[in-house]
Image (cartoon, rainbow, N blue to C red):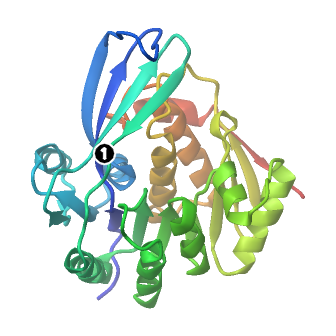
Amino acid sequence: MPKTHSIVTITMNPALDLACTVENFSIGAVNRVSRAQTDAGGKGVNIAKLLRQFHVPVVATGFLGDVNPHLFELLFREQNITDAFVRVPGETRTDIKVLDPTTQTTTDINFPGLNPTQNHIDRLFKMVETLAQNASTVAIAGSIPAGLSPHIVAELVSMLRTCGVRTVVDTSGPAFLHAVKAIPSLIKPNAFELSEYLGRPVNTPLEIVTEARGLVATGIETVVVSLGEDGALFINEQEALWAKPPRVDVVSTVGAGDAMVSGLCAGIALGKSLAESARLATSLSAAVVTQPGPSLSNLDLAASFESQVTVQSLDF
């Protein structure tokens, strides 16, 4: 059966994201919330939401608590995202984000995740293998629940490579280390995560590009290293690009990396060049940080930023 342009996202540790705006947030004091919103989230879920803005078929899977799946199920119905999550006994965790517009900081308070058993893991692998039959790209994003082997992302990548499916990985820590060895198609660490993986700091664009080219030489098609407000470096076998976003008023950085991955996945699905994908991913990320939540209701703001993104070819 020929592959469609469907994209599968895998979120093994989803969360209900409660974003609270608190002016002059102070530890140890009474803080009053001026604005709050709760979103069904987790990196892969955020990616799926944004991908639907591009009208590509999206399937979301991973582990989801059977006690409180309602906001997720509502989101999937409203956005026409196919729900392929494996239900696990218990509650999907809550992540609290305290946004202080005065200091332009975000304080994260993250609760523990679910406790999938081996049976749940086996069901997830069977689900992903089935979905791979009609998928062109699978994005594995976010942390893994405590108690799961850090090898699980690498095992998924290896299985999907055998199925002939392109894989995008955005995780960190030991899971990222093992995943890189499984040679996914695209990885998106930030500069700190790349340094952590290498066991030494990499700070300059030259250092980052050099190390990224070493990873490309192992078989990884594309390495994208995010640099926060300075944009991101995009490296494949032929090119090294630096995409810089316009300066924007930052409300929250929650979801910025997920927006970048969404743009990269959309670029793959739409057959865009590396430069076009870099511009798209960077504009999406810039648009998301101007919002209190991790997503966008439409692509208008991101589209307005695209012409303001500078994409520079690096000749070192």
Tell which of 162 and 298 is nearer to you: 162
Residue projecting furthest to the right: 316
- Does dot 1 land on a helix, a strand or a loop? strand
Q: Residue at x 58, y 42 (%)?
A: 282
Q: Position of residue 300 (x, y in %)?
A: 41, 31
Query: In this image, 267 relative to 180: left or right?
Result: left
Crowding at dot 1, Cα within 10 Å, few <14 / some 14-19 / many 20+, comes out as many
Instruction: State whether residue 132 appears in this view.
Output: yes
Q: Which quarter of the picture shows residue 114?
A: bottom left
Q: How many marks?
A: 1
Q: Residue tagged by mark 1?
A: 41
Instruction: State whether residue 299 appears in this view.
Output: no
Query: In this image, 238 relative to 129: left or right?
Result: right
Q: Where is residue 54 in the image (x, y as percent from the top left)?
A: 36, 50
Q: Which residue is drawn at 49% across and 66% down?
A: 168
Q: Where is residue 205 in the image (x, y as percent from the top left)?
A: 81, 50
Q: Quadrant of the N terminus?
A: bottom left
Q: Position of residue 33 (x, y in %)?
A: 31, 13
Query: In this image, 1 relative to 78: left or right?
Result: right
Q: Which residue is drawn at 33% across and 60% down?
A: 11
Tell which of 58 and 73 is nearer to you: 73
Q: Which amino acid does label 1 sit on?
A: Gly
Q: Quadrant of the C terminus?
A: bottom right
Compared with 122, 92 (above or below) is above
Residue projecting furthest to the front: 28
Compared with 290, 212 (above or below) is below
Compared with 149, 305 (above or below) is above
